[in-house]
Every structure is written in C-alpha cells, then in structure tokens.
Amino acid sequence: MGCGKGIMRHFAGNGIDGRWTGLDWRVNTSNLEAAGYTTMHDCDFDQPLPQADQSVDAVIFLHVIEHLPRPVHTLAEIARILRPGGVLLAGSPIAPKWIAQTREKLFKRQLQAGLRKPGRHINSFWPMRWRESVATAGLGLDFSTGAFLARCSGSPLENFSWWLRLNNLWGGLFPSLGSEYYLRARKPDLANCPTNFEMANLRECVSLTS
C-alpha cells in the first residue's frame, strides 16, 4: 500500500515466492511491472480496499498513514483483508505526543484554509497512538521501535554501519525522540488460539513448575 516505484519489491529480492499486489493513488505501471508486481490497482485508501476478506498474507504500509484522513478506518480495512496469522509491516514519522498533536492541529487548519494540498501530511503519530490504532483495528502488536536520531540523506555518513546502528539504537531506546517509528503487527489466528480450558491448564502447569 503506497507502493510508489516498487522499491520494496527490489529489496525483497527473489527469495519470496508469492504474488505482489501494488496499491497506490496513481499506480506507476511500468516501474511496478519492472519490479515484479503481478497485480496493480489505483486505490483511495479512505475507501474499501479492492481485496477480498482474508485474501493476503502480508501488507507493507510504510509512510502512508500520515497522509490519510481516517487512519483507523484504513487499518481496519487492512485487518479485513489479512488472513489469520497475516502480518502488517508499517511505519511513519513520529514525535512526542504534545508535538504530534500540535502539528496535526496545524495541518488541519492549513487544510481547511486551502494552504495544504490533499495528499500531504494531514495527521501525526506518537508511539501510543500507533499501538492503540493497531489494537482498535483488531491486530496484535508483535514488535515496534523508533528509528533515526537524525537523517542525513546524501551524506557520506549514511555509508557507515556505525552511523546506522547508532541511529537505530537511539530509536529503540527513545521511540518518541526518533524521527520514524516502525512496527510489525499480526492478525490473530483464532483457530490456533488456546481454549479457556487449555489456558487454565497452562496456568496450573506454570504454577506447579515455578
């Protein structure tokens, strides 16, 4: 979702045997075909997605949610199309809560005044908002972390592993104070969840062995 030129397909290489579907506001067909996408759709993410219920194994959703008018609605649509056990890989810019809320109010005023074009950033996230939004959509959070103390795109620093590790360490320790936030969430597989009876036996077993 928000596949752009299909860069993530290139990153994945040929080790994943599966069908890739690209969704974007305006699909760049030639680039996606060259990257190896099998299906492409022009798509408004504020509307129902064109996939059937429980039809995809994974959704890559990077730097899209901050552009959307109803983020939780879109996450619920992602949960709908994921198969049980399916994975969401997502990320966005991040900020401490008070900064993110102030920024979002500014974005909305600019949008109403015609000073901000639709499609630009219109909302802002902090870590807890991400976690709550994912939970509201019915997904379970596997992992989350901040990233990047500072981005220096085009700088020679970007070629050094120590610089990248320092940035990721900072993001992991202080998620709100990084510049980006990433997570992996999963749709529950209810068929494989333990029953209440099994959970009771598990708790009894733990108490006997601890």
Image: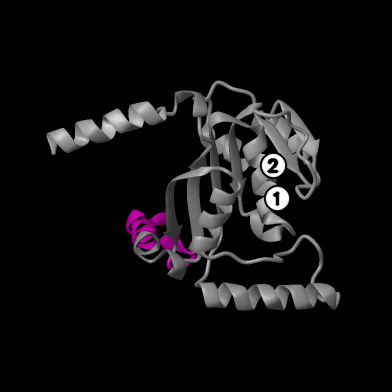
Q: Amino acid at mark 2?
A: Glu
**Residue at x 45%, y 24% (from the top left corner):** 192
Q: Quadrant of residue 60?
A: top right
Main SS type for the magenta part? helix
Instruction: Indicate whether residue 157 is drawn in magenta.
Output: yes
Element on which disc 1 rests: helix
| Residue bearing the label numbered 2 | 77
Picture quarter containing residue 159?
A: bottom left
- Residue lying at 14% horizontally and 34% vertically, measured from the top left: 208
Q: Quadrant of the C terminus?
A: top left
Alpha carbon distance from label 1 to label 2 = 6 Å
**Residue 18 sits above or below residue 70 on the image:** above
Q: Are marks 1 and 2 in contact (CB under 8 Å)?
A: yes
Residue 98 locus on image (x, y percent): 54, 77
Q: Position of residue 164 (x, y in %)?
A: 39, 57
Give the magenta part as a residue range: 149-169
Point out residue 1 in the picture as x, y percentages from the top left corner.
67, 43
Res 88 seen here: yes
Above or below 125: residue 193 = above
Q: Which residue is mark 1?
A: 73
Residue 154 can be seen in this image:
no
Residue sitting at 36 percent across and 64 percent down? 170
Asked whether 155 or 198 is in front, the reply is 198
Q: Amino acid at mark 1?
A: His
Give the structural element (helix, strand or loop) at label 2.
helix
Is 191 within the magenta?
no
